């Protein structure tokens, strides 16, 4: 498979989450991908997540219910280990829909509400840190 080149940041869609034109940072230092989730509630067998952020207007505040989820340990760059919920979803890049695992995290104070990590990038993309919004710019042509 030929790898596509992706820049250090881009805008993507998460159709199953009803999130569109979302700013993402490509983070080759992170293994897993992470998405900002403002509220997480375990309700019986389901996980209810609210994707809202005052600083990111495309995070509408819609609640999404996951019937299938797991928990995983994530170690930050400063060595702090956190146990997070992990869900499966889909992301659209370069007009193609890919499956993606996302850990749920509070990223309210961060510039980018989503980090795309190595687990997703592997065997699909090369990262050119001099580039930005390659997928998004192709979408708007």
Image (tube, rainbow, N blue to C red):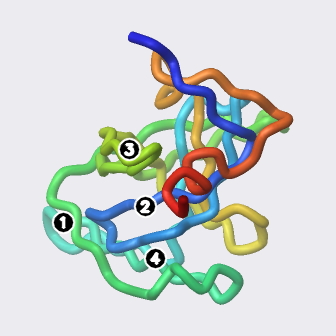
**Residue to which mark 1 is pinned:** 46
Secondary structure under the numbered disc 2 in the rendered image:
strand
**Residue to which mark 3 is pinned:** 71
Secondary structure under the numbered disc 1 in the rendered image:
strand
How far apart marks 1 and 2 lie (CA) works out to 24 Å
Judge depth for marks 4 and 3 and give the one in front.
4
**Residue to which mark 4 is pinned:** 51
Judge depth for marks 4 and 2 and give the one in front.
2
Residue 126 place in picture, x, y as percent: 63, 21
Q: Residue at x 67, y 51 (%)?
A: 133
Labels 1 and 4: the sequence-earlier one: 1
Answer with the quarter of the image where residue 15 lies: bottom left
Labels 1 and 2: the sequence-earlier one: 2
Labels 3 and 2: the sequence-earlier one: 2
How far apart marks 1 and 4 lie (CA) works out to 16 Å
Q: Could you say which is closer to the camera, residue 92 or residue 65?
A: 92
Secondary structure under the numbered disc 4 in the rendered image:
strand
Labels 4 and 3: the sequence-earlier one: 4
In the depicted structure, whether residue 103 falls above or below residue 22? above
Q: Residue at x 53, y 27 (%)?
A: 121
Within 10 Å of disc 3 (Cα), the crowding (few <14, some 14-19, many 20+) is few
How far apart marks 4 and 3 lie (CA) works out to 18 Å
Residue 87 place in picture, x, y as percent: 33, 50
* Contact check, label 1 and label 4, Cβ < 8 Å: no
Labels 1 and 3: the sequence-earlier one: 1
């Amino acid at each position: 498979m030929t790898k596509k080149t992706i820049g250090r940041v881009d805008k993507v869609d998460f159709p199953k989450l009803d999130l569109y034109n979302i700013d993402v940072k490509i983070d080759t230092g992170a293994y897993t991908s992470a998405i900002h989730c403002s509220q997480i509630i375990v309700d019986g067998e389901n996980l209810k997540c609210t994707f809202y952020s005052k600083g990111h207007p495309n995070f509408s505040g819609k609640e999404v219910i996951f019937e299938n989820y797991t928990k995983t340990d994530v170690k930050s760059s400063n060595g702090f280990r956190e146990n997070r919920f992990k869900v499966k979803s889909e992301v659209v890049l370069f007009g193609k829909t890919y499956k993606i695992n996302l850990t749920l995290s509070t990223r309210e104070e961060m510039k980018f509400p989503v980090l795309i990590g190595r687990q997703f990038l592997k065997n699909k993309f090369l990262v050119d840190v001099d580039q930005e919004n390659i997928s998004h710019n192709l979408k708007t042509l």
